[in-house]
Amino acid sequence: MIERIPLLTGWRFSPEWRDGMEKSEGGHAFADAALPHAPVELPLNYFDETSYQKVSCYRRTLPELDLSGGMRAMIRFEGVMAAATVWVNGKLLTEHKGGYTPFEADATDLLKGDGSDTLTVRADAREREDIPPFGGQIDYLTYSGIYREVYLDLCAPLRIGNLKVECADPLASEKDVRARVFAVNAGTAVEAAVEVTLSDLSGRRLASTAKNVTAAPGEGEFEVLLPSVSGLSLWSPDSPTLYCVECSLAPASAGSRGAEALPADRFKTRVGFRTAEFRSDGFYLNGKPFQIVGLNRHQAWPYVGYAMPARAQRKDAEILKNELRVNLVRTSHYPQSTHFLDRCDELGLLVFEEIPGWQHIGGEEWKAVAKENVAEMVRRDWNRPSVVIWGVRINESRDDDPFYADTNAVAHRLDATRQTGGVRYITNSSLLEDVYTMNDFVLDGGPVALRKQREVTGLDRDVPYLITEYNGHMYPTKKGDCEERQHEHCVRHLRVQNAAFADPAVSGAIGWCAFDYNTHKDFGSGDRICHHGVMDIFRIPKFASFVYASQTPPERGAVLKPVTWWARGERSVGGILPLLVLTNCDEIGLKFGPFDEIRVTEKSADFPALPYPPFVVDLRHIPPEKIGAWGMKWEDGLVTGYVGGKAVAEARFASNPVVSSLEAAADDAVLDAGAKDVTRVTVAAADRAGNPLPFSDSIVRVEIEGPARIQGPSLFPLIAGSRAFWVESSGEAGTVKVRLSCEGLETRELTLEVR
Ligand code: GAL
């Protein structure tokens, strides 16, 4: 492309579609809208999910365009739920089925380019039986509208539609880098010069090759080799080095844009060099064994569903990498935002990406869309080093060999560099993929945490094998649930991870799931939420999130989380023992009231395969005369984590917690002007020790001044002592004041700049 024009603002939106809207608003009620757009702002819970399953209309005027010299105007949609029909000036441009993958169309022939062109989109969010994932029940919501970006890409008549960068042997010190250039020629056959350059992210050129090609009309592919490139670093979770590959395609007569001269087209992509291989004895990254510790993620938020701009998408990747410290995320159950995946590339977070679907397989038209979804996913994300496997089955569907032979073939044909998986929960299912990817929900509190792979596959040999889900509905746990449940929730996550680490025939395990999510009435706790996350729907940690963070070395930061609300009478019978302490420290200390600190060096023997097993403090360590019993005085607590004898972390607990302060923090101080942007504000009622009060439901009022608004209600109760909300800027520059008040507590004010 030559220029990308974002079409994010200036939209008009009607919640109802009426015939003729492709030509005019026709006197119907339209309102101004900006992308990403949520047609319906939902309550947090207990809502009717059919409220958004509507057909709506979006319209906007296109800017003035210089289409001289044969320039082409491509309109690109990153995601419209769930089917889109697009018109330009009342004439049909394109149609697309599937809400999770991008599509584009060449609008040039329908455009005047004088600034009066109208783009109309009919967005059909009904759960139509001809489109995956619909047709059965689904444990998540799919929302509605144009919930991702739309762009107008001005391209040369001979344009580069896509670029795939491959490296046959990334581990070689001199790498042959192959660029596959997918060209589209809107004109007649032409001689052209194609040039491919590899640079680092600072723009330093590292290699470049040019060659002459003949571009026939229509689609064509050219291959350009950058041979024996040396000095390239590998991409890995610890060192996610990215490079930029840029390609230009210039017709022989290219030069200044005159009537005769044809402009050169460009395409840029980021790449990373690494190998990723699932073998029957585990996963190997860059040739070395690598244990996958992951979580599943839904791309949904409270109130606005999927319609969150780049910053929130990127933040989720940061939470997974830096707070939860997992090394892989599965984009359950569909291709997720490119902003999220961009951040995964940058942070070194591995990705299991899969096609849309949930248990149900539809008819022939449905299957055709599913196969197209495979192609669209692969073509969109094939250069991402983070993506290490394509999921080409409908999550947890029954076997359908002809269908899945096709989905595998599509992925392999388009991308020979990655293995496929297909997530299942049935045993003995046909292995048509490269990796047997299994949701193993066997752990129900009994003795077995994970089944042996041969018991699951029914095969007489080991194959590449990955656990793609566990826990979830087997033990839903809310952030504010009682201490005993929190304890068991943590133990179950620990047990499965321990079992995965212990079994060399398992590549790793991906837990269900990172964040609580809104769902259909047929799932969840009746409140339209699956409380399956190790974080709540606001991305506030539950205790179990520290199971994951604590499995990383203390050099990345000490983790110390005693699994307790610290009270004499919260548990049955009372007390806090046995006290589970999730930590990567090698020794802990517990000080109870006036008594001397007791030190514990011996880790729990129940999880021997974990890199950092937790501690369990019980009456062996602290005698009843010190910790006391029902009727005795409750005391302050201090748990300290030691590494090499040095105190590196502590957790303080108040024996007499009273609401002392309203704590509030924004994830970002500065938002971008020009388009919709968001940041999360977390708020908690805290005691004197700064701990959120787990059973506080104090009411918080939020007032916002300046060019921003709150998503969702501005008056709400805390949930288990804390909660969050997102402040959404309008795009206008200025200062935003966010005032939070709660009766009896000092008001807090946060200042954000939009610039
Ligand atoms: C799985 C399913 C997930 C989620 C999970 C809850 O069967 O793949 O989407 O519903 O159960 O534990």
Image: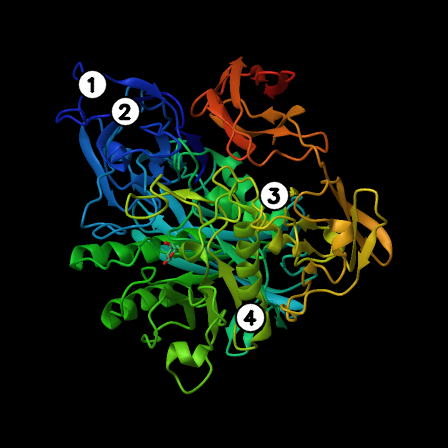
CA gap, disc 3 and disc 1: 63 Å
Q: Which residue is mark 2?
A: 59
Q: What kind of element bears circle 4?
A: helix
CA gap, disc 2 and disc 3: 59 Å
Q: Which residue is mark 1?
A: 25
Q: Position of residue 597 (x, y in %)?
A: 84, 50
Which of discs 4 and 2 lies nearer the camera? The answer is 4
Q: Which mark is first along the chain, 1 or 4?
A: 1
Residue 622's tag is none
Mark 3: amino acid: Gly
* Tag 4 and tag 1, C-beta contact below 8 Å: no
Residue name at image x 18 percent, y 50 percent: 130
CA gap, disc 4 and disc 1: 60 Å
Judging depth in this view, the residue of 578 and 412 nearest the camera is 578
On the image, which quarter does residue 444 sit in?
bottom left
Can you say whether 636 is above or below 489 in the image?
above
Furthest-bottom residue in this view? 460
Residue name at image x 66 percent, y 24 percent: 661
